[in-house]
Amino acid sequence: MKARSVLSLLLLMPALVAGSPSRPAPKPILGVDPAYIQTATSPCKDFYGFANGAFDQVAIPGEYASYGVNQEIDERNFTLLKGILEASARKGGAKGSSGQRVGDFYAAGMDEARIEKAGLTPLAPVFHAIQAVKTPKELVAMLGRLHVLGVQASFSFGVQVDDKDSSAMIASFYQGGLGLPERDYYLRPGKEADEIRQAYGRHIASLFTLSGDEPTAAQAKAAKVLALETKLAQASRTLVDLRDPQANYHKVARKELGALAAIDWDTYFAAVALPSAEAHVLVGQPEFFKALAGLTASEPMEDWRTYLRWHVLRSASPFLGKAFVSENFAFYGKVLSGTTELRPRWKRVLASADRALGEDLGQLFVKTAFSPAAKERALKMVHFHKEAMRARILAADWMVEATKAQALKKLDTMRSKVGYPDRWRDYSALKVSRQSFLANVQTASAFEFRRRMAKLGKPVDRNEWFMTPQTNNAYYDPSLNEMCFPAGILQPPFFDEKADDAANYGALASTIGHELTHGFDDQGRQYDWQGNLKDWWTAEDAKRFEARAGHIVKQYEAFEVLPGLHINGKQTLGENIADIGGLRVSYEAYKLAIKGKTLRPVDGYTPDQRFFIAFAQGWRTNQRPEALRLGVTTDVHSPVRWRVLGPVADFPEFRKAFSCEAAPTSQAPTAIW
């Protein structure tokens, strides 16, 4: 089977649609595509293989670690965005307009000759400042300066909704400062882990060499960086530990922060311009900051300067000359995820523009990619999902009425953001030019940092979006008790305003149903209807929830992804609950949507079969082994195949649709929702 061309412009450019004398009509993008179905595979034994077996023949392009339906959507979105950026770069725009900003940003990023000529010159002021660091106080000041520029050295600092007071914004501190994906990469024993650490050391040395150090000195510096980061990793919490919101919430009086961690916080606060009126801060992992304070005193300042220089180089490499870009890709692309080819420059610059000027770009994107009719239908689908969840809560025989009442209140107050914001972000104070790509990136990082700092002392902005409209993703925010579905994910085959309900509801089970269920997963359930981290469960119901969650942990830990490599059931618990519950909620929402309608089979598959096939085909993906292993060790989501197999394992309506035998009682997992 030949793979569908995801680079085609046929769906985006009117000149190329049916009727053009030079090109055929485009192949429709189907929520249920029979071409991917492997009929020789039993849907009862391997439903992912049945629905997607023919997709296994599709090669993974060199620039991708994984390739599937999400990348198909991304490619179509990218093509449209590329056209917008190129047109803006050609035409320019009035100074201070969105067209000027996105056009100049893109033009600067595509000007490889200017970037090569500049070399490391844009980093010279930062390197000079780092070299002047002689004391722990100066180190702390430098950390603040780097954080403003988007270099998250030593720890992460930001502004967020207070988990226990959802009406207020608060400054927050979180563990960080690592160059490898997460702490276990530094501490895990074994040959494979050793090889990755050695490759990381070589990568650090290579970047130091490119920046002007002699190879021997660069290797020595790499060893110092790795040693210091290992100490930070030893003080860090695991991914499983980070999933407990109560354990990672510590509200500390600003004046008492020094007692928790002996760091010159006043100097840091001055560097980041934290308003003096802010009396409290959040500290996610106190033990990490206590250890960090010790390291600022015990480790030589020379080692800290080397560490800071490394993180500046690491953060800046994607925006520097070809040698730096290639070295960055050689480790983070090839070694960690198995990617064989660097993405085209225009895609990398596009991604940077999306981060820097996301809603400027989004205003132009939605005019073409998401109609008012599409938004209306998507909102209607959200409504049916919420009604389906209401029915599931009412039918939950393991919950008492008092807990159900609170759950229903949370459901009724849950907000839904669909497509794009009602009010667009104002970038008028952000200055963008065509002179320096890296300078634009740093300026945009500082702009965003100051924008978030300005939220302190003000009411929570519940209209703000935390993804751009063109993003192919979605989220549930427990502190705001809201779901968000950008226009970028509401694209075929996930969603088509003209498609039938079986295809749309099945494909969006992993989006609308999934995000809705996050409000009631093992983390989301700890937040009340106002978004506060507050226990609203009876003790008995909480125990029953945890017992049912325990069955899901065991179910997923039995899945062997690669020989000897199993899914971490606790690490992925929240996403697994959302996957299982999301499919069930979406199925019942689909039934509400088709009530009173007469549906007929299509391509030989009944409406219910098409619902489940659309769900499974929404996960069709081929992955490189390196990417699969990376995901199992660092991701809170299960790999795609098991995001299909897990949810259908004990779903009676699925088994009925495909005439499967009932799951053995001893093997059947316990669903929560």
Image (cartoon, helix red, strand yellow):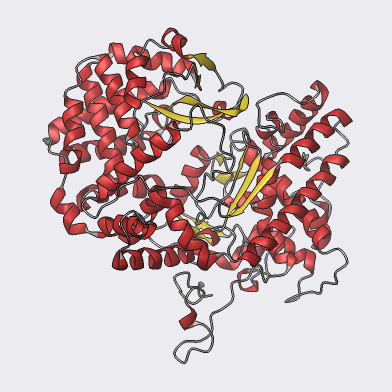
Return the x and y of residue 543 as percentages of the image width and height: 78, 25
What residue is shown at x 48% (from left), y 25% (from top)?
172
- Towards the viewer: 611 or 623: 611
Single out the residue that lies furthest toward the top.
259
- Towards the viewer: 622 or 383: 383
Single out the residue that lies furthest toward the bottom.
21
What residue is shown at x 76% (from left), y 75% (from top)?
604
Return the x and y of residue 596 as percentages of the image width and height: 88, 66
Horizontally, residue 68 falls left or right of residue 265, namely: right
Q: Can you say whether 149 is above or below 419 in the image?
A: above
Horizontally, residue 588 falls left or right of residue 48, namely: right
Return the x and y of residue 550 as percentages of the image width and height: 72, 31
Q: Is residue 374 visible?
A: yes
Horizontally, residue 134 falls left or right of residue 400, namely: left
Query: The N terminus appears in which quarter of the rendering?
Result: bottom right
Q: Can you say whether 359 is above or below 537 in the image?
A: below
Query: Which quadrant of the structure image shows residue 47?
Result: bottom right
Q: Can you say whether 489 is above or below 477 in the image?
A: below
What residue is shown at x 37% (from left), y 29% (from top)?
177
Q: Is residue 615 visible?
A: no
